[in-house]
Image: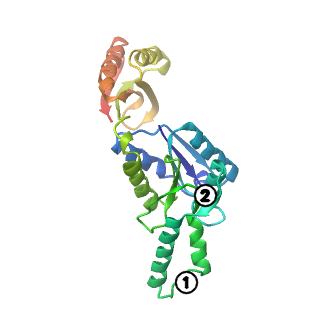
Amino acid sequence: MVGLIIIGDEILSGRRQDKHLVKAIELLNERGMALQWVRYVGDDPDRITADIRHALDCGDVVFSFGGIGATPDDHTRGCAARAVGRALCLHPEARELILARSREVAEQEGRTFDPDAPDTQRRLQMGFFPGGATIIPNPYNRIPGFSLMARIHFLPGFPVMAWPMMAWVLDERHAALHNQTRVCERAVIVYGAMEAALTPLMEQIESRFAPVKVFSLPSVDHPVHGRHIELGVKGPIDVVDEAFASLLDGLNQHGASLGPTSVR
């Protein structure tokens, strides 16, 4: 299974809207993978540490977004070290990448590069990872992310960096998981029905066609369909078609008024 941890007070306060969830689902779907859970957490070291410990214990592939910079509100690297019980240390490959980036910045600004300059030393803090971590290359500015246990992956909060890094991890480190959980959704608009009246049919479909799941999305003021329920099934492609046909049969027997169908 795959989970996400999305970190930052700015998300919880509403100063910024999270974009990682939608993009992560897209990247997973492109590879026949699916997202099972997501956790949002503010810049609270104890809560971040607890969520990382959960990720370590649950056995899932987990992507953590945010908090791996070097400002006072960036706690993720330290929390990861606490969670795994290892000290932070400067990763040798990260050190070389960060120094190379610092040299580039100095040249672009017309300055002489000084590896001991305060700005350079602050940048090097972003290369301190828990012992045993492996790096995740950053194609945008070379400042790497890192992985623990080969399945917990820590990425920056900036989408322009994080999304290609996530794609790289999925392709380079988890290719064996591609196309193992490809799912399909089929749904139909049901007019004027009550969810309570359709619940026995939904339960019957899930019982007959496990692991297919039935979903029900009611709406009372849709601009096109008005009051309706979007009723559908989601699961492995080879089972969904039969489950959906059975759902339609049940709805027709119920005398439901049906609208358009959709496939995802």
Crowd class of label 2 (few under 14; some 14 to 19; many from 20; radius 10 Å)? many
Question: What residue lies at 67% left-to-right and 52% top-to-bottom?
Answer: 82
Tag of residue 114? 1
- For this view, does 72 lie left or right of residue 259? right
- For this view, does 80 lie left or right of residue 167? right
Question: Which of the 4 image quadrants contains residue 39?
Answer: top right
Closest to the observer: 160 or 48?
48
**Residue 125 at x, y percent in the picture:** 60, 68
Residue projecting furthest to the right: 46
Crowd class of label 1 (few under 14; some 14 to 19; many from 20; radius 10 Å)? some
Q: Which residue is mark 2?
A: 77
Tag of residue 26? none
Q: Secondary structure at mark 2?
A: helix
Residue projecting furthest to the top: 253
Q: Amino acid at mark 1?
A: Asp
Question: What residue lies at 50% left-to-right and 77% top-to-bottom?
Answer: 102
- For this view, does 93 lie left or right of residue 14? left
Q: Are marks 2 and 1 in contact (CB under 8 Å)?
A: no
Of callouts 2 and 1, which one flags the residue occurring earlier in the amino acid sequence?
2
**Residue 110 at x, y percent in the picture:** 47, 88
Q: Is residue 155 visible?
A: no
CA gap, disc 2 and disc 1: 25 Å
**Residue 186 at x, y percent in the picture:** 33, 29
Closest to the observer: 234 or 63?
63
Q: Secondary structure at mark 1?
A: loop
Q: Amino acid at mark 2?
A: Arg
Question: What residue lies at 32% left-to-right and 19% top-to-bottom?
Answer: 248
**Residue 37 at x, y percent in the picture:** 51, 39
